[in-house]
Amino acid sequence: MSCLRIYGVVLLSVLLTPALSAQFAFATNSSSAANAPQIKEGPKFKVAQKVYQDLMQARGDFRMPVPTFIMNRGEEQVAFANPSEMIVGLEEKAYNVCRSFGADSLNALAMLMGHEATHYYEKHAWRQGFAWRNRDLAVGLSLDSLQDKMANETEADYLGGFLAYSAGYGVFDKGAEFIDKIYDAYGLKQKPPPDYPSLAERKALTQRSGERLKQLVSLFDAANIMVAIGQYKMAADFYERVLLDYQSQRLYNNAGVIKLLDGLDCFTAQELGHYRYPIELDLEFSPNSKGESSGYAEKKDRLLHEAIHLFDQAISLDPDYAPAYLNKAIAYLLLDDIPRALAYVSLEALPRAEAQKKAKVIEDCKILHGLIAVKSNNLPEAKKQFQELAAKNTLAKYNLSVAEGNIPEPELAPSSLFSLKIERIDGVNIATFSDGFDQKLTQTVGSGYKYNQLNKPGSKVIFIEDRVGTGSFLYQITNTDYKEATARGIKIGDDREKVKSQYKDPKREVQTTRGDIMVYDKIMFFMQNGKVEKWVNYLLPE
């Protein structure tokens, strides 16, 4: 799961026509814009279309028809959404403005189109259409006010920015510069659009919307890190907070994974036969304290059924979302419902993963087939499934060893390893960190968590205070373009074997749809396709 960051830009659009066409704020309502020649091929169209497809997959809400993407040579609308014609569009001139940002060009493009797509999914057109149809009434005039339009635009910027982030696009924090360039390209500094805030006010809205978006992204990052260190209750509360503002199949799936991992914590290693599941963190259980009382059995079943419910919600948004079917199959296997587990992995998860060419999900489906064979007392079939992947998949290699009667003992690094060299990110030693946090980013999450952060040049420092009594958590996460190395010389882009050569085997691992998280004492590595994507230095309560 990617944890990139993106900062939003307020893209001030307005619904100007009875056809409910959501226009960029700088547009004019002329027929020439609607009839501009379309671009249906070429490198610009292919790049923009790919970004749009990524956004639609990340949105993952297929209860509504997906609008068609078009690109044209118009010079009046910048970008637009027309719900009545099921279209999201982009003008070539706006594409060129995005391209002028160089390394940030795709981020700018994703932000721009994510904003317009959000107008469609949040049904802003219905509200503006209602206002237009009832413009002779006081309520119609109220709904068509500048204040109401700006509320729609701010929401589209906020949620559109998170959509771009969830699609894997990176930081875009040049909002004011973007608006300046749009004004220049479209000649709006000489002829500003009527009945709209000034350029200075637009920039102020850009900054505020960006700050709000940073908070949502940081809560999402925090939830993922809490999963990695086994703080499931906290992770669940953070995911629930994110889901209040933004819903997608991925978020519901991840919320279900938390319940599933928490349910695994109710089993002993002996109950699971020492096998590891595609979504598990680790199997460090105490046979004397877990899995032996009716209370744990009830908790286990409750958590697994809650996980299934969340996976169903993900599937209701996107019937072709393979990871939710896979995780649902795992939940049923842990509930000893082998027929349902086999059906969901064989008939639902694997065909979809193969059709979408999701290599990691395909491998995890095959590992689960092996675990189902174990549960069905068909050890030869289990060994066959694990053997096919063992050369390239560490989880399959581990489970193959267990199936052959050998329980691998991880080569854990001694605790002294992590004190011999002090880990720093952006020059910060997390153990002695005492800088002030940005009070504007302080917020309360759930029933008892206080969250705050401080942005650094190549990272951000997060402080989470658990007011219920667990204590305080402090961690620092690198940006994905961070250039420096860890204390033991690991950089972004290094492979798994290089990490293990310096830090030994991880204490626990979290499987993701494209890699895993390697968790050590005080440091964890987020891996994407076998390479370090970023890392985190963290400090747990005493």
Image (cartoon, grey):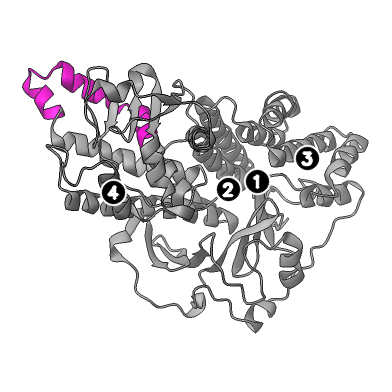
Dot 2 falls on a residue whose secondary structure is: loop
First in sequence: mark 2 or mark 3? 2
Callout in the foreground (2, 4): 4
First in sequence: mark 2 or mark 1? 2
Dot 1 falls on a residue whose secondary structure is: loop
First in sequence: mark 3 or mark 1? 3
Measured in 3D between alpha carbons, the distance from the residue under mark 2 to the one under mark 1, in whole angstroms, is: 7 Å
Kindly check if marks 1 and 4 are in contact, taking CB atoms under 8 A apart as contact: no
Q: Quadrant of residue 466?
A: bottom left
The rendered magenta stretch, by its main secondary structure, is classed as helix
First in sequence: mark 3 or mark 4? 4
**Picture coordinates of residue 460, whole percent (x, y):** 45, 65
Dot 3 falls on a residue whose secondary structure is: helix
State which region is magenta: 115-143
Residue that appears at 58% across and 59% down: 229
456 up-or-down from 135: above or below = below
Which amino acid, by three-letter code, is at mark 2?
Met
Kindly check if marks 2 and 1 are in contact, taking CB atoms under 8 A apart as contact: yes
Which amino acid, by three-letter code, is at mark 4?
Ile
